[in-house]
Image (cartoon, grey):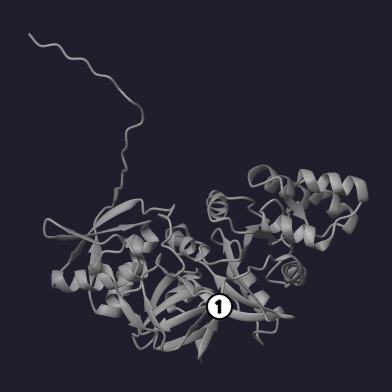
Amino acid sequence: MNKLVLGVLAHVDAGKTTLSEALLYRSGAIRRLGRVDHRDAFLDTDEMERERGITIFSKQAEFSLGDLAVTLLDTPGHVDFSAEAERVLQVLDCAVLVVSGSDGVQAHTRTLWRLLERYAVPTFLFINKMDLAGTDREALLAELKARLDSGCADFSLPPEALAEEAAVCDEALLERYLETGELAEEDLTDLVRRRKLFPCLFGSALKLEGVEALLEALRRHAPLRAYPAAFGARVFKVSRDARGARLTWMKVTGGALRAKDLLTNRRPDTPEEEVWEEKADQLRLYSGEKFQPVDSAPAGTVVAVTGLSRALPGQGLGHETAWTVPALEPVLAYQMQTEADPSAALKALRLLEEEDPQLRVSWAAGAVRVQLMGEVQTEILQRRLRERFGIEAQFGAGRVVYRETIAAPVEGVGHFE
């Protein structure tokens, strides 16, 4: 069975989690359609997410499209948690970028678009909330072409019009189209794979309009990966289950991972003191809150592994190398204020830093400092410290984190008498 790892991304309030819910419902993965505002969405499993109506942590769900097994990764839409979304991008085969039909392309939409471009992720677009008054399909498509990419194409067009729209995305393909007057399905898929064509579907996730068309477009044109026989995996997330067990999330990118396999980060250039070698005790295939233990995870599978204590997001295992430096950096630095034992507070933050490496926890001048993206993330961090570790903490006024570098060569001349 072919495998596809699909990410859903969006600016906050564009309807991303609602679309994820609709995809799972229409594909038969869930029997009841939950809603964010009713606090019963399948993928909003954390209490803080249900209270705030936003996605804070990336989530996984499984569904099928014929002979295609899809792993759906729902990502945070709020800018404060965009580092979590960026980590997910590095394991995707393709993505659906959700754009609100009533708001159009937002600043964070363009940030996500640049990240998708950076990681070369083939992208479909779902323009949501088209049931609201004042939405203009033609104007929205023109905005997508102007602000994102000219390869954005309306996939509801008749076959002849769609072929003409797609052909202009590639010079060689255009010449063939002018000669034959037609394009094959494989030509469209290849354009999507090379990020020259971006299928656009319009609808309303809340009313399940356009969702079937999106599923069909994914089934027909989502590019599939070929994986090598040698084992490889990418670690993209660390979390803990309800009992506190450490879960190391990874995508298998070659061969297969089996329960009780020995994993290591050993490389010729890895310092010996940083090398670890640990056993993968259990492999878990999650869908929402529930998981199924599996004996083996073939290439293309996203799996949570227990038993690993030192694997961190960004590490490559087997044939995979470490990832590049993240594009998104925390913009504010805060000093932590607490009456708790400083060493206990630092230890708690170090555990949370495993789950979110962008916290950048440090100890200086007798104070604990962290780097964050904004006020909402600060509030969430305070609550996690209180609920998980019993630590009451406050954070002072944040200061902007500056990064300085030499902009241009300068020659200086001095004179002394």
Residue at (35%, 60%) from the top-left corner?
A: 358
Residue 407, relative to residue 293: is it above or below? above
Which residue lies most toward the front here?
Answer: 268
Q: Amino acid at mark 1?
A: Thr
Name which quarter of the figure residue 159 lies in. bottom right
Residue 292 visible in the picture:
no
Apparent side of residue 158 relative to residue 308 in the rendered image (left or right): right
Mark 1, residue position: 301
Q: Percent x, y for residue 203?
A: 74, 64
Q: Percent x, y for residue 156?
A: 82, 60
Which residue lies most toward the left here?
Answer: 417
Q: Nearer the viewer, residue 366 or 278?
A: 278
Q: Nearer the viewer, residue 337 or 30?
A: 30
Apparent side of residue 141 relative to residue 106 in the rendered image (left or right): right
Q: Nearer the viewer, residue 36 or 304?
A: 304
Residue 331 visible in the picture:
yes
> The residue tagged with tag 1: helix, strand or loop?
loop
Q: Percent x, y for residue 36?
A: 56, 74
Crowd tier of the residue under label 1, counting other residues whose Cα lies within 10 Å: few below 14, some 14–19, many 20 or above: many
Residue at (63%, 69%) from the top-left corner?
A: 226
Number of disc labels: 1
Residue at (91%, 46%) from the top-left corner?
A: 179
Residue 71, relative to residue 188: is it above or below? below
Q: Percent x, y for residue 243?
A: 35, 89
Which residue lies most toward the right here?
Answer: 180
Which residue lies most toward the top here?
Answer: 417
